[in-house]
């Protein structure tokens, strides 16, 4: 197939522009995260848990036995308070979380994972472990370690930058 002809003016204009090599780090991090989340979502959906629900449970699982205030969950997940309120309502109706009065501020309520919620989290951990094994096929343990260390450092740098704003 013959090559498409371009005008001399167009060639001169494009020749004067420097060739920019894209910095792919951000795109790769985003794409890998999005694609992994999609795989995880497909498996968890078949178990009756939506992405939003497993995201809330994952967030709560990171704080330990103290639970979290809804406003802190919404801030951590970067979604609105009303959205989180609806999610917590559905998770509570399913028996995965419960709201309890805050020990220090009786006007406030904290969200805690129930035993049934911990069963879902255990399932999430199994699913994540299985997915990671497949996703990381062919990646040496040394490269996995280096990648984790690099991403942890990048995360710390970003956190510092956000706190300095």
Image (cartoon, rainbow, N blue to C red):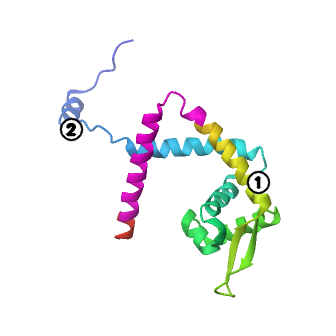
- Furthest residue in direction top, as rendered: 1
The residue under the point 60% across, 68% down is 73
Percent across and percent down for residue 159 are 41, 62
Mark number displayed over residue 17? 2
92 sits to left or right of 130 = right
For label 2, count other residues whose C-alpha is less than 10 Å away and answer few (under 14), some (14-19) or many (20+): few
**If you read the primary sequence from the N terminus, does the residue marked by circle 1 or circle 2 appear first?**
2
Image point 78% across, 61% down: which residue? 115
Task: Name the side, left or right, on which 87 lies relative to 59.
Answer: right
| Contact, mark 1 vs mark 2 (Cβ under 8 Å) | no
Q: Nearer the viewer, mark 1 or mark 2?
A: 1
Q: Is residue 57 left or right of residue 135?
A: right
- What separation in Å lies between label 1 and label 2 (alpha carbons)? 57 Å
Q: Looking at the picture, how far across and down is residue 15, in whole percent?
A: 19, 32
133 w.r.t. 74: above or below: above
Residue at (39%, 11%) from the top-left corner?
1
Element under label 2? loop
Q: Is residue 49 left or right of residue 71?
A: right
Q: Secondary structure at mark 1?
A: helix
Q: Residues within 10 Å of mark 1 (few under 14, many from 20)?
A: few
Residue lying farthest to the bottom in this orientation:
106
Question: Residue 118's quadrant in the figure?
Answer: bottom right
Specify the segment rendered in magenta. 133-160
Residue 67 appears in view: no
Residue 33 seen: yes
Q: From the image, which quarter does the C terminus lie in? A: bottom left
Read off the residue under disc 1. 119
Chief secondary structure of the magenta portion: helix
The stretch drawn in magenta includes residue 99: no
Q: Is residue 159 magenta?
A: yes
Can you tell which mark lies on residue 129? none
């Amino acid at each position: 197939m013959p090559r498409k002809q371009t005008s001399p003016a167009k060639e001169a204009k494009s020749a004067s522009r420097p060739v920019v090599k894209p910095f792919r780090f951000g795109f790769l991090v985003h794409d890998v995260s999005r694609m992994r989340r999609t795989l995880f979502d497909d498996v968890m959906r078949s178990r009756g848990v939506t992405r939003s629900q497993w995201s809330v449970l994952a967030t709560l699982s990171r704080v330990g036995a103290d639970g979290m205030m809804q406003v802190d969950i919404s801030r951590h997940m970067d979604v609105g308070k009303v959205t989180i309120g609806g999610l917590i309502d559905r998770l509570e109706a399913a028996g995965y979380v419960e709201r309890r009065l805050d020990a220090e501020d009786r006007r406030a309520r904290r969200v805690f994972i129930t035993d049934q919620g911990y069963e879902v989290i255990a399932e999430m951990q199994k699913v994540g472990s299985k997915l990671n094994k497949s996703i990381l096929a062919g990646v040496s343990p040394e490269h996995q370690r280096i990648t984790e260390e690099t991403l942890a450092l990048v995360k710390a740098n970003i956190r510092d930058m956000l706190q300095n704003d």
